[in-house]
Structure formats: structure tokens, C-alpha cells
Image (spheres, rainbow, N blue to C red):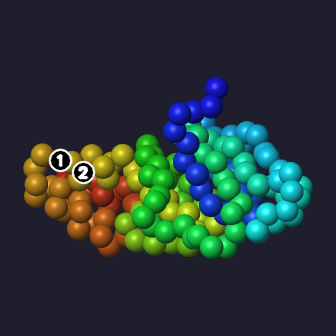
Amino acid sequence: MVSKNTICLWYDGTALDAAQFYARTFPDSAVGAVFRAPGDFPSGKEGDVLTVEFTVLGIPCLGLNGGPTFKHTEAFSFQVATDDQAETDRLWDAIVGNDGQESACGWCRDKWGLSWQITPRALTDGMADPDRAVAKRVFEAMMQMTKIDIATIEAARRG
């Protein structure tokens, strides 16, 4: 059954590569149907991969090889909740280590330009602490980080 809502992500001829990377990297992720163009199109030829159906962490997506016109921006990102430092490190290192790029506060960008927030639950919990002084300490600690370090977040939470 086709999902009622699917995220469409634009790629410049690399949708299948991206989908395969996401399927290898994230749990509950897979590559589905690959559709090849029945004729030439502005950014490709007949037989080229036109679209790829895939899921990332259970979210249905469609990769469209639409050409170089539209680029990914931070205005859209996947936020991935992690349970511990090992999971945080594994996902961060997979993205950044595959020609990705580090950014601030748990954000990174994959080699296709898609932004990811690798967000430990400890950070989310600390930011939501009802004690606003605690939340501020957690926030200030996060603002100094690229990849989130859970031990530092927990220390900030304790004061």
C-alpha cells in the first residue's frame, strides 16, 4: 500500500546511492522500488534511475533524480533520536565519515547535502527539564558541541 504522505527528496543522479546508504545505516530503513525512465528527460536518459522508493527509520521517502537545479538545505532535516553515546557515535560517524560534513549542535550533512540532527534523548530530556536553570545549562553545553557528548550533557544537567 502506498503511503498517503511521502517525503520527496531531490538528487542529482544519486538517489539510489543515497537510498542504499540510508538503508545500510539506519534501522527500520530499506530500499523499495526503483523506477527507470521510459524515455529521455532533462537530467537523464532512457533507462536511468528516475525515482527510488525507500524508507528511513520507517518514514516513507521518494528519491527523485531531478538534476542539479534544487539543492538540499537545513530547512529540511531528519532528526534522529539516539539512546546512548554508542548509537550517537555510530550514526554521526557513518554520515560524516562517508564524505559528510560536521555542523554545530548535533547537526551534520551527508554527502548528498541532506541535513541530519543526531539527537540523544538525554539532550532532549535536559532541554525539557522543568527547572529552567537546568535547561539553560544543558542548552549552553550543547551550543559548544558539534557531535553531542552525552556525558557532558548529563554533567551540565547535574550542575
| Residue 102 on image: x %, y % | 51, 72
Quadrant holding the N terminus? top right
Please name whichever residue, 21 or 123, is drawn nearer the observer in this view of the structure: 21
Q: Residues within 10 Å of mark 1 (few under 14, many from 20)?
A: some
In screen coordinates, is 101 left or right of 103?
right
Q: Residues within 10 Å of mark 2 (few under 14, many from 20)?
A: many
| Residue 127 on image: x %, y % | 23, 53
User: Residue shown at 56%/63% (left/top)?
Assistant: 114
* Residue 112 visible in rendering: yes
Name the mark on residue 107. none
In which image quadrant can residue 92 be found? bottom right
User: Residue shown at 66%/53% (left/top)?
Assistant: 63
Q: Residue furthest right?
A: 47
Q: Which residue is mark 2?
A: 126
Name the mark on residue 129. 1
Q: Is residue 60 depicted above or below 20 in this figure?
A: above
* Residue 100 visible in rendering: no
The amino acid marked with disc number 2 is Gly
In which image quadrant can residue 93 be found? bottom right
